[in-house]
Amino acid sequence: MSRIHLLSPRLANQIAAGEVVERPASVAKELLENSLDSGARRIDVEVEQGGVKLLKVRDDGSGIAPDDLPLALARHATSKIRELEDLEAVLSMGFRGEALASISSVSRLTLTSRTADADQAWQVETEGRDMAPRVQPAAHPVGTSVEVRDLFFNTPARRKFLRAEKTEFDHLQEVIKRLALARFDVGFHLRHNGKTVLSLHEAGDEISRARRVASVCGPAFLEQALPIEIERGGLRLWGWVGLPTFSRSQADLQYFYVNGRMVRDKLVAHAVRQAYRDVLFNGRHPTFVLFLEIDPSTVDVNVHPTKHEVRFRDSRMVHDFLYGTLHRALADVRPEDQVAAPAAISPMSRASGLAAGEFGPQGEMGLAASVLETPVANAQPAWRGAGAGYQQPAGNPGVPAAETQAAYREYFAPLPAASPAALPQEQGDIPPLGYAVAQLKGVYILAENAQGMVVVDMHAAHERITYERLKQAMASEGLRGQPLLVPESIALSQREADCAEEHGEWFQRLGFELQRLGEETLAIRQIPALLKQAEATQLVRDVLA
């Protein structure tokens, strides 16, 4: 029978580190939050080998008194709260008092700090296997530096779960970007393996804040986002919401903050999803950078050690406020049909020359071919934000009728003129979608089969036909490329540009030829031949999304 015994402080800290320290990005998050709580206006981060070999965070905050340096590395030691009542209205990023102790238990940590009234700086060093800190004088300006070396050096099992250097650095960089959006008044500077990767200066005015959002989320997001700001019932929501036309295939461009704290909350996610429900296709994710300001006493941030989750006292009120605000903002964005003006229609033209929105008699020739005379993209809406001056450009240019006429005829058949009101008796000859009857608004094909009326979205049908052709080509000889006469340049986020460069061979298989011109710029030299009518820049954006 095993006996109950106390764990050693070293083992207890290493176990606690499993909750707080998952990878170098977790360490960066804790250290950066401490710097922000100290009142820093500039934070410099230096990283080597993705943060595993070295992660150094330096700030110009208030610093730590010499007598408090050893205590800063002890568990449950903090300067941010004293009583339980303080926790009920906490505004600081950290408050648990266990981050530095957990980090120092699985790394070689050096903490150097100096306060404004001190003559010199002091330094404390500790290693995972030696929890007794050593304090000594050092040279350092006012502020604090935390140097973390050889992460998980004494826990090989944890180190085996780390990913490649680039993957770990990408996670770390994402943490810095999220915090940079939370604190526009602080400058963030990042270096990796001696190279400057990120340099964000203080953003005190609206223009500077918008510039920082563009640096983090990409200029395309800011160009196609609606700024919002509303305050009601003690709640204030402000930020940027992406237009429905600027959606993503993954939820990687969603930033939500509660009182300056980055959170991932199911209630928030549901409210946003409901607001976009009527304007987004299935499987697409909205983009947004939103800040919710609320009375700290009505939100509990002490739900999880990483503080990513929160609990609202009145969750229904918060949900309805978020949903209502976003829903109204998106309601001001109206789709405007871009249908070309119809030409004069001859009385004898029957259905083959119908103008948008008109109906004609059933004739010898179905509309499967005639609707193709109107480019498919003319049916694609352009979203315009009322009062915001934002407009999403039209999608793919028109698709020539000759290329897709035969494909449409597989789904539609001409209705015999001799019997305009009745379907033929031989049901086996009826195509799946029946007989084309009319074209509506330049957007839909109205057809009739044995079951009744069929309404077909021209744009969606064309997309499906093109998709099937792409699948067939990919399964056989691969997608042929169509070189561009004049290469086009496209501005992206650094993450998207890295993705395009990393998967260059995969893009070539799809018929693309992309060239890296800069950290956030690509040149498009070739696109798939089957999509040669598409807008090259938008096509590449959609693939990278």
Image (cartoon, rainbow, N blue to C red):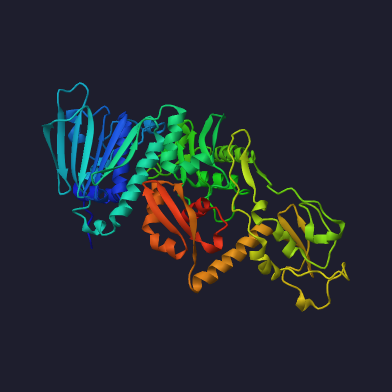
Q: Position of residue 35 (x, y in %)?
A: 30, 34
Q: Position of residue 36 (x, y in %)?
A: 33, 33
**Residue reaching furthest to the top:** 117
Quarter containing the N terminus:
bottom left
Up/down of 126 relative to 363, above or below? above
Up/down of 20 relative to 66, above or below? below
Task: Write down the quadrant of residue 80 in the picture.
Answer: top left
Judge from the rendering whether residue 377 lies leftward or rightward of residue 113; answer left or right.
right
Please say whether residue 305 is visible from this viewpoint.
no
Up/down of 397 relative to 34, above or below? below
Question: In the image shown, does 269 or 484 lie closer to the viewer?
Answer: 484
Q: Residue at x 47, y 63 (%)?
A: 511
Q: Residue at x 70, y 56 (%)?
A: 374
Task: Write down the quadrant of residue 437 in the picture.
Answer: bottom right
Q: Residue at x 39, y 63 (%)?
A: 505
Question: In the image shown, does 321 or 249 lie closer to the viewer?
Answer: 249
Judge from the rendering whether residue 487 lies leftward or rightward of residue 321; answer left or right.
left
Up/down of 424 relative to 378, above or below? below
Q: Position of residue 540 (x, y in %)?
A: 48, 54
